Amino acid sequence: MIRRASEGEITWFPGLVLSDIPQPLPKGIGIRARRNELGLDIQGLAGAIPLLNGDTLQIIPKIGRVNFLYLLFRAEGTLRDLEREYDAFVEYSVDNEQNVESIVARALILSLAEILGRSPKQGRVRCHREGLFAVGQVDAVATSLNIASRKREPVAFQVRERTLDIPENRVITEALVRAWHALATRDQVDTRMIRDKWLGRFPRSTCLGKDLEHVQRGFASARYGGPRDYYRKALMLSQIVLGSSGLGFDEAAIIQGDAILLNTSDVYEKYLRNVFSSAYSEAGYIVSKGGIGVRSLYLDGSYELQPDIVISKDGRTLIIADAKYKQPTAGDHYQMYVYLTASGIRNGLLLAPAFDAEEVIVKEYCTADKVIIREVFLPMSNLAATEDFIRTAIERFA
């Protein structure tokens, strides 16, 4: 059974008891009780986590699941050919907010059926073998010892053998394990044979972070085209299921058993930074976290200053922006003022999500010394408007 909760509020679950909740719970999930009901107060997290009674808890992000999937994918970088493939998948497959996880999960499993029916990708691993004669490179020392000890098969050698235990297959396996929880019972019945066949042949990952990095490098170097093009969709969907490589968000992802939970504010920040980068990098601008060089508040290096988004060109800082997954506070304004003062510029942006707006809203604040800080509320239900605004930020504010 799939139980759904919403980010940013308390969701009550009739019939759920304390022993159904895994412990320890990640930071951001609190337990509440009233009468005979148990509730979960979820702040700043999205994703899915298995409960101890066999149910799956799905946490729906504030901005909606379709838009959040888009944020996740754009946060991965500027692989434009892959973005086009993802856009086509969403346009073709996703028609409402209720079934997006199950559609992604089912599409993943069907893409695995195609791999199994064609030719699974293999790698080669160096193995140590012994026999009556050498097939690969002879290990002279080990062979001499074997002869001296009168082994029946004394020739020791190294040989490279084919293996299915490679990062691409392991990433897909991890995604399959997690995607299974999102399928409706009928879909599980229909696709169980594919799932069992895959899990029977391909191992799980012992280091998911490294395997995801390997896949990301593969996409960046166009390794999954040509005759292995049918791996592209499976790996793309695997990244979506795994939080679009949530492990790449530093502290953004919490892996717990077969669950993956994403810190929504970290995803939001990286999404914004990558949209800025996509818009301006080709024109020679540098978009980074923290900017060029390390600045600190004090001369002894105490309290590092690291804005979320710094845009510079020819060694000169043009714009400083901070991503705030909330209503900006006085503390956020003080922090931005320090960033601007330390960098010697007069314009800063506090970029906050607007969950109930269709257009960008800008509020401007000016200090006595002419430093201008703008609160910019970006519509999360209209990401096209959000990205159009970002693409003109330098012209507007630098």
Image: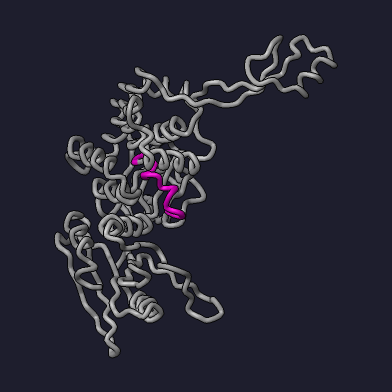
The residue at the far left in this view is 358
Residue 193 in the magenta stretch? The answer is: no
Q: In the depicted view, which residue is nearer to us: 4 or 82?
A: 82
Residue name at image x 51 percent, y 48 percent: 23
The residue at the far right in this view is 148
Q: In the depicted view, which residue is nearer to us: 254 or 341?
A: 341
The x and y percentages for residue 56 are 38, 39
Residue name at image x 48 percent, y 70 percent: 294
As displayed, is residue 160 above or below residue 98?
above
Question: For the N terminus, which image quadrant?
Answer: top left
The residue at the far bottom in this view is 368
208 left or right of 241? right
Residue name at image x 30 percent, y 49 percent: 74
The x and y percentages for residue 338 are 39, 79
The x and y percentages for residue 7 are 32, 54
Residue 193 is at least partly visible in this image: no
Residue name at image x 21 percent, y 44 percent: 97
* Magenta segment: 240-252
Residue 7 is at least partly visible in this image: yes
188 left or right of 94? right
Residue 248 in the magenta stretch? The answer is: yes
**How many tags in the picture?**
0
As displayed, is residue 205 above or below residue 154?
below
